[in-house]
Image (cartoon, grey):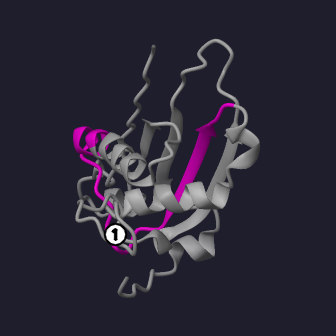
Amino acid sequence: MRILISIKPVLYISSSRAAAGENSHMAKRALKLSVRIPNFQTDAKAWRRAIHTAIAEVQKRGNVQYSKTDKLQVEICFYLHNPKLTILDLDNRVKDVFDALQGFIYDKGKGGLTPIIPNDNQVYRLIVEKRFPPKVNLASLSTILIRRYDYDARTAATPRDTRKH
């Protein structure tokens, strides 16, 4: 089985800082995580914990931290086998993943794990699909990609108001 983990830090070069004679190689805070996550498990608590563990390990290695003001986009691909492909609702699977991202393992927003993202209302764009795993590897793990949201310049540039969770 091959597991691919990719973290790509981005180099930020500000032309206005360079023109002012400041250090033009100011590193932009890395906000991109690409992680293989466990496939669906019927025990929701165990699945949320496994998702959280997989993402937290990659997050720690890549030194990626999300603040309360970050605007994010999330892409999730669930690999499911029949009959789960046609039976499972995406919205419920996404709720489980978002709970895991916030460190909520138990019901009613409880769980006590360190949040990966402070609040799921920081997600401005979400792309989710369910599909059969690739024929070459039927045991393929599902995937999640978390990165900075920048698709709408006005939305991306507007300061993010925060609220208590």
Residue 20: quadrant of the picture = bottom left
Question: Depth check: 75 or 110 in front?
Answer: 110
Residue under pointer 1: 118
The kind of residue on which mark 1 rests is: Pro
Q: Is residue 120 above or below residue 21?
A: below
Q: Is residue 77 above or below residue 1?
A: below
Q: Nearer the viewer, residue 21 or 107?
A: 107
What is the total number of numbered labels drawn onto the structure image? 1
Which SS class for mark 1?
A: loop
x and y percent of residue 118 in the render? 34, 69
Left or right? Give the position of 71 relative to 62: right
Residue at left offset 37%, top offset 47% = 46
Task: List x then y, in percent, for residue 29.
Answer: 31, 54
Q: Which residue is located at x 34 percent, y 40 percent?
A: 54
Quadrant where the N terminus is found in the figure: top left
User: Where in the figure is residue 160, as x and y percent of width and height?
Assistant: 45, 80
Is there any visible trace of residue 154 in the rendered image?
yes
Q: Residue at x 23, y 44 (%)?
A: 60
Q: Magenta residues?
A: 57-81
Q: Is residue 149 visible?
A: no
Is 76 a magenta residue? yes
Residue 150 occupies quadrant: bottom right
Which residue is at the front of the view, 17 or 106? 106
State yes or no: residue 161 in magenta: no
Give the residue displayed 36% in from the left and 64% down from the top: 102
